[in-house]
Image: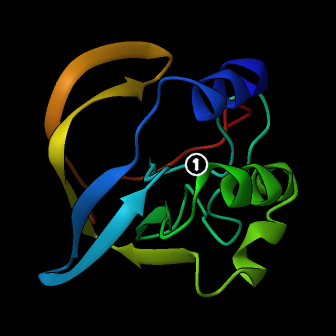
Amino acid sequence: YTTLAIKLLLTSYKSNGAKVTVDGVTKEFKKVWLAPVMNGLFYGGGMMPAPQQNRKGNDLSCCVVHSTNAIQTLIIFPSLFKGEHVKYKKKVDVMSGREIKVEFDTPQDVQIDGEIIRDVTEISAKKFADCKFRDANL
């Protein structure tokens, strides 16, 4: 994941704008490099884009890395592995809520559970209150 991300940042990937709606409140972002919607804490081989996320909790999280150029994004990128990217408050927004929708200005390739889906203009996710988690040992 890391090698691919760096290669894309330095070559073909072009950032775009996105609107992120969390529980009915919409924020617009320019130059979006990353906008995962998370139920769990980790993805992509150990990245922690939403360090406060709790998969057993009531909310989902969305981490938006935005308003940077490729070099600035490369500087922020390593801090995603420890959840330290949140200190870049002007360039990183982490939002939480039960219902999250991300609308891209142009079609994007997205990854869902390791599968790549091409030409996506919108993703949405909803956390249902009646979902219960059970320990596998019970």
Q: Position of residue 67 (x, y in %)?
A: 48, 70
Let me know if residue 53 appears in the view: yes
**Label 1 secondary element:** loop
Comparing 14 with 47, the one in front is: 14
Q: Quadrant of the C terminus?
A: top right
Left or right of residue 6: residue 36: left
Q: Position of residue 40 (x, y in %)?
A: 58, 48
Q: Which residue occupies 46% across, 23% down?
A: 113
Please tell me how crowded label 1 is: few (under 14), some (14-19), or many (20+) other residues with Cα within 10 Å: some
Comparing 6 with 59, the one in front is: 6
Left or right of residue 71: residue 78: right
Left or right of residue 132: residue 3: right
Q: Which residue occupies 28% across, 66% down?
A: 129
Q: Position of residue 65 (x, y in %)?
A: 53, 63
Left or right of residue 41: residue 83: right
Q: Which residue is mark 1?
A: 40
Coloured how? Answer: rainbow
Which of the 4 quarters of the picture holds residue 101? bottom left
Q: Amino acid at mark 1?
A: Gly
Q: Quadrant of the N terminus?
A: top right
Q: Which residue occupies 66% across, 42% down?
A: 135
